[in-house]
Image (tube, rainbow, N blue to C red):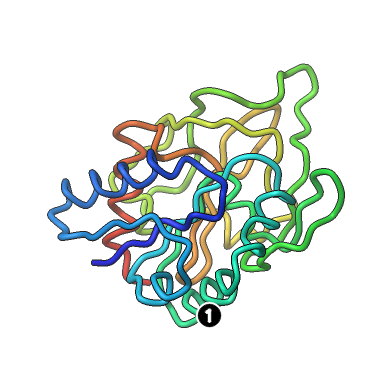
Amino acid sequence: MKIAVVDYGSGNLASASRAVQLAADRAGIAADVVVTSAPAAIRAASRIVLPGQGAFADCMGGLDAVPGLRDALEQTVDAGTPFLGICVGMQLMAERGLEYGATEGLGWVQGEITRIDAPGLRLPQMGWNALDFQPGSHPLLDGLLPGDHVYFTHSFALSDGKGAEILATTDYGGPVVAIVARDNRAGTQFHPEKSQEVGLTIVGNFLRWTP
């Protein structure tokens, strides 16, 4: 299995690639994990992981700044290659982001990225929070239980999302979208590479996923 971790100048590339390799090893999957910005490598991948950290506009700008990278990403995912976005990588799946002005996203899931409305609570939301989801509702959730904790660090999140595309939420002054999926595209607002056993389970599920 060829797994491309997309390098566009943003994200925990080393941590993400290590987590993918470890999850593959644990699942008994022979995996070639490569951190790359090469369009040809994206097109040849059997799985694509898009990490991200920082501001939505900066991350989208970084993706657009690499010649041919966005086209390769969109065309390969449109053709059915399973995709996992992490943190801002997940946010880029939305229709647009409203951090420091409006920026168009990839438009893969419904909704826009807005500042979390959590009066009295600190932003960014930083630390371990529990997941709320319906067990058995999606292969990415296999082996997890409602209440399992994962690691978040963010001030913006998906709003006005489509119910069928929201797999899990967490609570931070109200429901906050934690996992989305549509067809062969999925994303986690939290960092699975920092979420220990629960995170590795999710990454392993992604590697076994056949949407």
Q: Amino acid at mark 1?
A: Gln
In the rendering, at what x and y percent does residue 56 appear? 70, 48
Closest to the observer, 26 or 34: 34
Instruction: Please tell me which residue is depicted at 28% across the width and 45% down the height of the picture.
Output: 143
Q: Give SS at disc 1.
A: helix
- Image quadrant where residue 126 sits: top right
User: Left or right: 155 with respect to 22?
Assistant: right
Quadrant of the image containing the C terminus: bottom left
Residue that sits furthest to the left in the current view: 28
Mark 1 neighbour class, 10 Å CA radius: few under 14, some 14 to 19, many 20 or more: some
Q: Which residue is mark 1?
A: 75
Could you say which is closer to the camera, residue 103 or residue 123? 103
Identify the residue at image location x=58%, y=30%: 153
Residue 176 percent across, percent down from the top left: 64, 39
Q: Which residue of the protein is positioned furthest toward the right in this rendering?
A: 101
Drawn side of residue 147 relative to residue 112, left or right: left
Q: Position of residue 8 (x, y in %)?
A: 55, 55
Give the residue drawn at x 70%, y 62%.
105
Q: Count the numbered circles shown.
A: 1
Q: Quadrant of the N terminus?
A: bottom left
